[in-house]
Image (spheres, coloured by chain):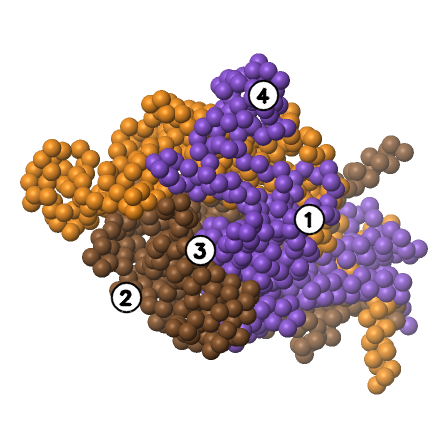
Chain colours: A orange, B brown, C purple
Amino acid sequence: MKSQITNALADFFFEYETPRQVLVRNSKVGVVCRLIQLGVVAYIIGWVFIYEKGYQSTDTAVSSVFTKMKGVGYTSVNGYERIWDVADYVFPPQGDSSFVVMTNYIVTEGQTLGKCPELKGKNNCSSDADCEGGNLKRTGHGQMTGVCVNTTKTCEVLAWCPVEDDTIIPDPPLLMSAENYTLFIKNSITFPLFDVTRSNLVDGIDAAYINKCYHDPKDDPLCPIFRLGDIVRLSGFDFETIARVGGAIGIVVDWTCNFDVAVKHCIPKYNFHGLYGNPEEKDKTKASVGYNFRYARHYFEDKVQKRTLLKVFGIRLDIIVQSLARKFDIIPTLMAIGSGVGIFGVATVVCDLMLLYLLPKREFYKNMKFKHTDSHVPDPDSEAGSVETEASKK
Amino acid sequence: MKSQITNALADFFFEYETPRQVLVRNSKVGVVCRLIQLGVVAYIIGWVFIYEKGYQSTDTAVSSVFTKMKGVGYTSVNGYERIWDVADYVFPPQGDSSFVVMTNYIVTEGQTLGKCPELKGKNNCSSDADCEGGNLKRTGHGQMTGVCVNTTKTCEVLAWCPVEDDTIIPDPPLLMSAENYTLFIKNSITFPLFDVTRSNLVDGIDAAYINKCYHDPKDDPLCPIFRLGDIVRLSGFDFETIARVGGAIGIVVDWTCNFDVAVKHCIPKYNFHGLYGNPEEKDKTKASVGYNFRYARHYFEDKVQKRTLLKVFGIRLDIIVQSLARKFDIIPTLMAIGSGVGIFGVATVVCDLMLLYLLPKREFYKNMKFKHTDSHVPDPDSEAGSVETEASKK
Amino acid sequence: MKSQITNALADFFFEYETPRQVLVRNSKVGVVCRLIQLGVVAYIIGWVFIYEKGYQSTDTAVSSVFTKMKGVGYTSVNGYERIWDVADYVFPPQGDSSFVVMTNYIVTEGQTLGKCPELKGKNNCSSDADCEGGNLKRTGHGQMTGVCVNTTKTCEVLAWCPVEDDTIIPDPPLLMSAENYTLFIKNSITFPLFDVTRSNLVDGIDAAYINKCYHDPKDDPLCPIFRLGDIVRLSGFDFETIARVGGAIGIVVDWTCNFDVAVKHCIPKYNFHGLYGNPEEKDKTKASVGYNFRYARHYFEDKVQKRTLLKVFGIRLDIIVQSLARKFDIIPTLMAIGSGVGIFGVATVVCDLMLLYLLPKREFYKNMKFKHTDSHVPDPDSEAGSVETEASKK
């Protein structure tokens, strides 16, 4: 029994089976098949390995973004001069990766809760019957009291009064000085699979450099300080237009890293692109352009609750971190090789079909390739064998 | 030397090797193996290619979301009428993809910094010894002064006074009118791999349509205006319940696109689902239901700093963009084919095992299939050959 | 015609082709090849299947995070005692997954719009000529009026006056009590591919447990209540340092789930890591450490608009949800097997090269393996066959 197992093991280890093959000496099929096979090899090496880097595994990063605006704005409306600093024009204030820089606004000061008519031209009425008391219109400013005000021919509403009049957007935008604001982006990313952490303040970007540099795609591609005007220009917008009605810009921080080379080559690229479109470029019938929101500051005056309503037009900046790191890994390499060998098999199948069904001598090749187990068909081996044996006897 | 290389090249290009095979004419093994092979082919074509679309490469999008609520709320508490507009009930105001719509609140007006007892029933004490002076309780409202107030039998604290009493949540919720608020979602996505940018304001969605439409899963599946009541209903909540204690709802904008067909078929689908659960449906012992946060408005009254504290119950809406685009790509196609040929090889191995170890005539087939290099075993070829040669001579 | 198709079908189904193989009985090549083949099998089973779980498909989750801070802070500056509660120290208030807890601040109270000199030492001037009127300096506080103020030797600006003096950061930080604040994280995730929804309030985490537990990596790894001091310590920071100048900490909620076992084993792991670095540990020349932002509260006093400016130093907490679920799937399994068979083919190629080009008896093996279709080369089969036939005749 034991010797049986030993024998089986010996047989298993000392024997090696290799497929028997016919060497077909035919220039047509030879050239075609070799070209197909070379093509497959070229595809596997050139495309899968070199172009698509199929020998590497990939990972995306966990990232963290902190932003800080700097700069001061100045407005002079009806002789009233005002200064706008970061605490005034950035929403929200805490340095999120998505925030809005106010560039234009419509201010409605001293609103109190009370009754007043809607704006002229909106929510029109000819008599009290048109203003159903207690009703709330979605596009209105408050609850209708059931009264039609004669002077404006609009329904009276219980609302924050006076109601906001946003028909005229200041042009040019009030905060054109926003063009000179600067944005500082701090971005750190971690690739958990490769255990690498990088910051956009890469080697060579020190405090001295940051204090004087401005980002420029050609000259200072790694400077993390961006002029707002540059951002708008690089994303294809016209500053005055976007400042007037608002817009959204995506700043893509692109980390495409290859960790088969030194980590120091893993540096960010900054791209800028408009997110909702420029009103000048788009089809006029398009539903929604610009970017604005309403924001209220509440206060008490003589024990009466009041508020200042701001309709803020601004540039919304979304810092989007895109990351893709690659590193040599044995699994995808072998997967790619394995698939490649499989595709190689496809080439063999194609050539065999050609050999067995297309060539004039196909019957001869069939006989060479196949041996039949039933005696209805004469065995090709022994037949060819005997012929050639005779030939070799000559 | 040169002619040697030429010869080797000629040999390489004009010769083609193809494996020699035995054609086993046995209905049992034939049928079984053909079925296995057909199964593998059916699996590769049907499942990998047609069902899982293995011939396509995939990409996820970079997306940008902007939201805008519309609508006016009305409350009447103790005869005090109030209007709530967007600037009052949306947190944060700037149209983020994640925001809260206030539907209920507990207001504590005119808080000042000072000393007052804790609420009855919380932080109880029987004597000053129970209230360690200078200590801050995590669940308390301020720093204990070391005094036990007789009237309430609770510790006195240095805090914003009077302390908030949130034991009674207004029922029905104060802002039931929130049901009629509308949400406008503007979403643009970019698939960087395929260089396609799409907006949820697809072709045919123009300003005129948006002004009158409301989203409806059946009739207006592409309208980007959503009634808050519909959102709540479609996510399986009861509006009054969620409005009272708050809750969180995810609005999934699903972009599943196939770029092998025209890009215009790449349109979003909107799904709604509750995120933290409805208190009515869940196990009562579950730790945390509802959604609320505290928010303060600071002001000065007679040079004294005061604040209005709002405990806001609301519906938190998270706009979640899910995207998956597919397009024909040669790499995954060949990977799938390559793997398929590999699996085909597995089928051959299974059939060979059957042929060589299970069939009654297995010794015969073994002899047909294998040729031995050592002379201990008679050569099957010549043997079978001679038998068949004789047979063919008949 | 019909019988032809029937015959072809019969041929197709009743015939099975299997490659003919040479069994090479050579201990050297046998052992080497068997070891290579065993190595490939071991790799496929051990690495691809067991270690990398190649038989499973993977999915990442859609997640939703809600946070809530608790705790009260106390400051006493120049004898002025103040209490800070959640509504005062959390930015933004609504429980986002990314927020800031204020731990230190520089307050500038009662700013009004007006003219005042810049801080001593910044924006220096010796005469009015140094202060270009109407100009806005990026690092300045306002618009220069063109006047050089003698007392401070700095330019006068139109700004919120008095300008903020942030040269001295309070040390120790004013809100050291922040160490005892607690953070509650509510996180629910959905794996769309596997249709599984999980919450971090897993089974056994009920209201009673939450009311008394604090997260501890060893003793209470599933408790969703975190002491801020613990978070800072676990992320490797020193609390007093980070509280003074601010910093950012990522809380990674890691859901690595295997749905081939019971879903109840799918539980979160919490990891903490610093995001922008500790100023003490980093190179002093590094550009930017700490975390701060400015925040203003506007109010009216005697009809004059004023504001309180806060420079907030704080700990920014980013809750990052990482998720990876795995489940058995037939596609990746067969892909892995297919690739494995392909790699097996590579092993055969390597062994064949050895057999045909390295072994001393390579010519013999070549003759065994290959049959030529042209008569220039004697047919190995018939030759060997006749030899062996003779041998077998003995």
Q: Secondary structure at mark 3?
A: strand
Image quarter where the N terminus of chain A lies is bottom right
Residue at 79% of width from left, 41% of height from top? B11
**Residue C150's mark?**
4
Residue B40: x and y, percent?
A: 56, 62
Using the rendered image, report if marks 2 and 3 lie on a common chain: yes
Using the rendered image, report if marks 4 and 3 lie on a common chain: no
How many residues crowd mark 1 within 10 Å: few (<14), some (14–19), many (20+)?
Answer: many
Residue B143: x and y, percent?
A: 51, 63
Q: What kind of residue is marked 3?
A: Leu
Residue at 39% of width from left, 72% of height from top? B152
Q: What kind of residue is marked 4?
A: Asn
Q: Give the chain letter at badge 3.
A: B
> Considering depth in this image, is B204 or B127 the residue closer to the camera?
B127
Q: CA distance from mark 2 to mark 3?
A: 30 Å
**Residue B171's mark?**
2
Q: What kind of residue is marked 2?
A: Asp
Using the rendered image, report if marks 1 and 2 lie on a common chain: no
- Which residue is label 1 attached to? C278
Let me know if residue A207 appears in the view: yes
How many residues crowd mark 3 within 10 Å: few (<14), some (14–19), many (20+)?
Answer: some
> Considering depth in this image, is C61 or B276 the residue closer to the camera?
B276
Q: Give the chain letter at badge 2.
A: B
Q: Secondary structure at mark 1?
A: loop
Q: CA distance from mark 1 to mark 2?
A: 49 Å
Q: Secondary structure at mark 4?
A: loop
